[in-house]
Amino acid sequence: MPKRLKQLSEELVHKNPYWEYKHDTYTLPNGGVGNYYYAQKRGAVMVVPVTEDGRIVLTLQYRYLGDKQSIEFPAGAIEEESDVLSAAKRELQEETGWSAEDWTKVGEFFSNNAIIKANFHVFLAQVNRQHTQELDDSEEIEVLYRRPNEIDDLIISNTIWDGASLAAWALVRSQLPV
């Protein structure tokens, strides 16, 4: 079994409103010193919203780094003043206009455990009220509705390509009807 690495130092290289970029040194298995560079943030939430008729609420938005449209579940950062569930409720409302009273935390994951130190918390929400979206200035989001089997097809065809959405779907899919 691989050994746990011992951290020797941690240096903050850069900080912005969204991330911290860090450089750690650690002891290598051979006794030498290694360098590790990574990004860190407070974490994020992702919501898989289900309407009363069983449709799943998704978002369609342009993603700069992929340079294309992306179908995703509502998601966002956990801000300093909020807890995980409050952040999930906020992101659902802001991005889709929907709200829910019935929430289930289905799991959590690291989206890229080699270079990003941040937990994604995944919730299943039974939505029951629709309001107006409250988008940030940088957001332009279209709300989509799909049946679970349609989402399966969108994943198989690589139309849904967002890694966090793929992981969230893996966590919730068994809890939804065919």
Image (spheres, helix red, strand yellow):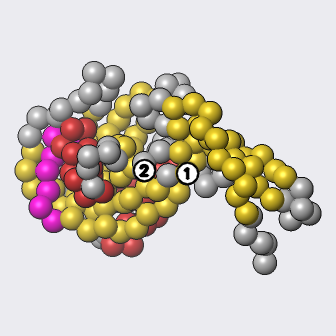
The residue at 81%/59% (across/down) is 27
Eyeballing the image, is 55 above or below 158? Answer: below
Residue highlighted by disc 1 = 117
The residue at 69%/50% (across/down) is 9
State the residue lying farthest toward the front: 9
Q: How far across and how far down the image is residue 130, in percent?
A: 9, 45
Q: How far across and how far down the image is residue 105, in percent?
A: 31, 67
- Residue 163 magenta-highlighted: no
Q: Quadrant of residue 11?
A: top right
Q: Position of 128 compared to 171: left or right?
A: left
Eyeballing the image, is 44 above or below 169? Answer: above
Give the amino acid type for the residue marked by disc 2 in the picture. Answer: Gly
Q: Quadrant of residue 30?
A: bottom right
State the residue lying farthest toward the top: 137
Magenta part of the chain: 96-102
- Residue 100 magenta-highlighted: yes
* Badge 2 density bin: few <14, some 14–19, many ≥20, Cα 10 Å: some
Q: How far across and how far down the image is residue 7, in percent?
A: 70, 58
Q: Are marks 1 and 2 in contact (CB under 8 Å)?
A: no
Eyeballing the image, is 79 above or below 16? Answer: below
Give the amino acid type for the residue marked by disc 1 in the picture. Answer: Lys
Rounded to the nearest angstrom, the CA distance separating label 1 from label 2 is 8 Å
Q: Position of 5 compared to 114: left or right?
A: right
Eyeballing the image, is 69 above or below 110? Answer: above
Predominant SS along the magenta part: strand
- Residue 43 is labelled as 2
The residue at 53%/38% (across/down) is 20
Q: Secondary structure at mark 1?
A: strand
